[in-house]
Image (cartoon, helix red, strand yellow):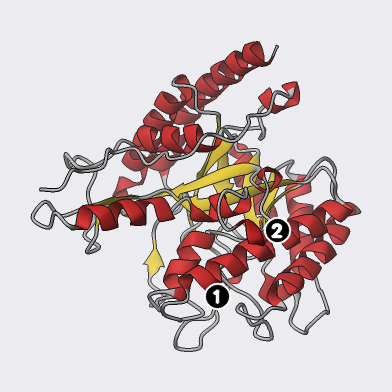
Amino acid sequence: MEARPSGSYVRHVPLQPSTDATETAALFPSVFLGGFECSCQRLEDGRRLDLVASTQHDLFARQDYARLRGLGMGAARDGISWVAAERRAGQYDFSRAGRILQAAKAERVQVIWDLMHFGWPDHVDVFSTAFPGQLARYAGAFARFLASEHDGPPCFVPINEMSYLSWAGGDVRCMNPFECARGDELKAQLVLASIHAMEAIWDVLPRARFLQPEPLINIVPAPHQPKTWRRVECDNLYQYQSWDMLCGRVWPSLGGAPKYLDIIGVNYYPDNQFMIDGTTIEHGDARYRAFSDMLLDTWQRYQRPMIVAETGCEGQSRASWLRYIGNECSTALQAGCELHGVTLYPVLDHPGWLDDRHCENGLWGYADEHGERAIHLPLAAELNRQAELLDAARRDMLSRRCLISA
């Protein structure tokens, strides 16, 4: 049998860590963040998703943010929707984003703004040479809108999950743009557009911060298929490729540089470990890698501030999943990982992408006519318990980094 690779996929010298003392402060006012589903892609049958509207978050943003604050969450990921903001080429309407912004300000919630969460306007061709400039113009327009409304340095996600979108939409046809064997081309386009968008925002808001979320995965080979070990190592390393492109380690023709890899976001769900045939490796399986080890691998590879940008699960396992994630994050923090927060994603139940089924994966359910939402009490109780533990672990990590920087 061929020699198997180790469980770690760290292959590069870390980027030069910052020695600026300001980098030892917490990035967000709370260790837990809320995440609002904001996908707006077009499905293969032609339907267009709008999860902000489907969850009625656009109507009840003030109540939703008040609920976050009530459980101690002072920050959230939320989405603008490029589709809603640019219905005609070059004409921008940020009125919906403005209402969400005002709600967040009123409830004192810091927002991470997703600029492109799986969807783009119909007049945009993601493979066109015009695409990076189109995203940059939209990003710059929103930055100018935000400049007159926002206090403090804002934070953005230029494009959510570039590696996943490239695979799903460019290789296996399960997501827009429903192409095959164009994943590398699509990934290069997305990274180039992300760089253009960041520069456009910095032109307006020089202190802006950027979060780059990608799924953290572990692909496990079948023991009776020894030749898949080489393929598995390659596929596992692909999870880092967008980050490597952004910081200039690979594909330097795209113009990547360390400054473009600011805050690393890792998205992690119960099905993020699987065999090469797609079979999920369940937590408790001997082949299952500890999430803390995966966090530490990523930290050691890049030496950049990190958050868990998405995590959660569906049904009655929501509280037990958060308990596992919280314990693993505490372990990673104690081992030196600069982890600044955990985003519960999503915080609102939503209709399924393909079948409109009620996905019970939120902290709160569907809204009634007055904007009231039933809370999932076991998850709320676990959130409260984990917040206390993780906040202490985060403070300890930041204190140790202060001593190192001094």
Question: Residue 41, which numbered label?
Answer: 1
> Which residue does the image show at 54% across and 64% down from the upper left?
368
> Which residue does the image show at 45% across and 53% down from the upper left?
362
Q: Position of residue 357 (x, y in %)?
A: 38, 72
> Which residue does the image show at 69% across and 71% down from the upper left?
82
- What secondary structure is found at the residue carrying circle 2? helix
Local crowd size for mark 1, using a 10 Å CA cut-off: few (<14), some (14–19), many (≥20): many
Quarter of the image for residue 294 reads top left
Relative to residue 314, is residue 224 drawn left or right?
left
Toward the bottom, the furthest residue is 46
Q: Position of residue 108 (x, y in %)?
A: 74, 41
The amino acid type of the residue labelled 2 equals Ile
Q: Name the residue under label 2.
A: 195
Relative to residue 11, is residue 219 drawn left or right?
left
Q: Where is residue 136 in the image (x, y as percent from the top left)?
A: 77, 66
The mark that comes first in sequence, 2 or 1, is 1
Compute the Cα span from label 2 to label 1.
Answer: 21 Å
- What secondary structure is found at the residue carrying circle 1? loop
Whether residue 184 can be seen here: yes
- Looking at the rendering, in which quadrant would you find the C terminus? top right
The amino acid type of the residue labelled 1 equals Gln
Relative to residue 354, is residue 32 drawn left or right?
right
